[in-house]
Amino acid sequence: MPLDWDMVVKRYTEQPYIITIARKKEHPVAKVTETALIIDLPGRDQSVSRKKLESAVKLIESGHKIRTVKDYRKMVADERPSYALAILHDLGYI
């Protein structure tokens, strides 16, 4: 099942935070746009691209294992992999 962006918007509007897998650290989600999820970090915001998350979900659903930051970097992108993994985990994909 492809990534349901409306579900992502709803989830992070109702519970605006992610928890990283490795460090179990909570980070607030500033907003969700049509193209990205924006994470509020001290001193700056970081975005996780909708397209990259959708690509990761397609890979996972086709049988690829994306379980670590290294996996995400290798198979999807070197674009905030720890936050992307936290989102994918939170949404039940990993």
Image (tube, rainbow, N blue to C red):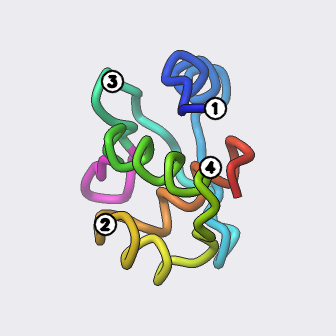
The tally of labels here is 4
Disc 2 packing (10 Å; few <14; some 14–19; many ≥20):
some
Alpha-carbon distance for marks 3 and 1? 21 Å
* Residue pointed to by mark 2: 77
- Residue under circle 3? 33
Mark 4: amino acid = Glu
Q: Are marks 2 and 1 in contact (CB under 8 Å)?
A: no
Q: Quadrant of residue 19?
A: bottom right
Q: Which residue is mark 1?
A: 1
Upstream in sequence: badge 2 or badge 1: 1
Residue under the image location 62 percent in, 49 percent down: 61
Q: Closer to us: mark 3 or mark 4?
A: 4
The residue sitting at 59% across, 42% down in the picture is 17
Q: CA distance from mark 3 to mark 2?
A: 20 Å
Label 4: how many Cα within 10 Å (few below 14, some 14–19, many 20+): few
The amino acid marked with disc number 1 is Met
Give yes or no for contact between labels 4 and 1 (Cβ–Cβ under 8 Å): yes
Mark 3 in CB contact with mark 4 (< 8 angstroms): no
Q: Which residues are magenta?
A: 39-47
Residue 72 pos. (x, y %): 45, 70
Whether the residues at callouts 3 and 1 have beta carbons within 8 Å, the answer is: no
Q: Amino acid at mark 2?
A: Ala
Mark in the foreground, 2 or 1: 1
Position of residue 85 measured from the top left corner of the image (x, y, whole percent): 56, 61
Residue denoted by label 4: 61
Q: CA distance from mark 2 to mark 4?
A: 17 Å
Q: What is the distance, in whole Å, between disc 3 and disc 4 at their CAs?
A: 24 Å
**Up-down relation of residue 10 to residue 36 (above or below):** above
Is 49 drawn above or below residue 41 in the view shown?
A: above
Q: Secondary structure at mark 3?
A: loop
SS class of the residue under badge 1? loop
Kindly report the distance in space between the C-alpha atoms of the residues bearing marks 4 and 1. 7 Å
